[in-house]
Image: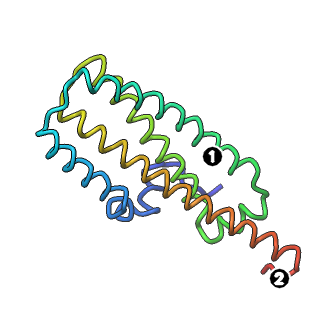
Amino acid sequence: MTYEASFIKRLKKLGIKKLILSFDTLAFIITFFLIYITSNGTIIQESANQILMSFIEISGSLFAIVLAGLAIVTSFTDKDFIYAWKKIEEFDNIITLFQYNMIILLLIMVFSLFIRFIYYNSFAMITLISIFVYMIVSLIDLVGFVSKYGLQRGEFIKQLKEGTHK
């Protein structure tokens, strides 16, 4: 069996440069500086506690949704379509993007718990808010990728039915 089990290697193949030079990263940077400048680098812990609890709850819910999406994509895809996607080297990318987004969500949950219950720091809070925005934009990209997947699957089935599939 020839597949790349290593998440890091699959992420490199997907394109670390693509991930760094993306709208996600731009949203992170803009959010960070906007919040830092408007708050003078200080967010009061009492105000942050409500935000942190929301981040924990939202990230947990989104993690479950992303995991369910991954399960649906992998289990309801027929073997011919998986083969076609493997041939054009896109199947590994969709699995990697799901895994990447789940890791971001886990990072937000753990970071939120740490900041709320172990050690509060305004700079860390501003960074966490920026990571949260990064995650939202990243999930929008994942939805776009899954939509592309769905459209290509539809085209694949159409070609199979019409006998034009190569």
Give the residue at x 55% y 61%. 144
SS class of the residue under badge 1?
helix
**For mark 2, does the 10 Å Cα neighbourhood hold few (<14), some (14 to 19), or many (20 or more) residues?**
few
Q: Residue 48: horizontal and vertical position, in percent?
A: 28, 27
Circles 1 and 2 in contact, beta carbons < 8 Å: no
**For mark 1, does the 10 Å Cα neighbourhood hold few (<14), some (14 to 19), or many (20 or more) residues?**
some
Image position of 63 (left or right of 133)? right
Q: Locate residue 94: give its quadrant.
A: bottom right
Give the residue at x 41% y 46%. 135
On the rendered image, what quadrant is the N terminus found in?
bottom right
Q: Which residue is mark 1?
A: 70
Q: Is residue 44 above or below residue 39?
A: above
Give the residue at x 35% y 24%. 50
As shown in the figure, which amino acid type bears the numbered disc 1? Answer: Leu
Mark 1 or mark 2, earlier in chain: 1
Q: Locate residue 3: give its quadrant.
A: bottom right
On the rendered image, what quadrant is the C terminus found in?
bottom right
Q: Nearer the viewer, residue 63 or 42?
A: 42
Image position of 93 (left or right of 48)? right
Extreme-left residue of the structure:
40
Q: Is residue 83 above or below residue 101?
A: below
Image position of 128 (left or right of 79)? left
Q: Residue 45: horizontal and vertical position, in percent?
A: 22, 23
Residue 138 numbered mark, or none: none
Q: Which residue is mark 2?
A: 164
Q: Residue 6: horizontal and vertical position, in percent?
A: 48, 49
The alpha-carbon separation of the residues under discs 1 and 2 comes to 29 Å
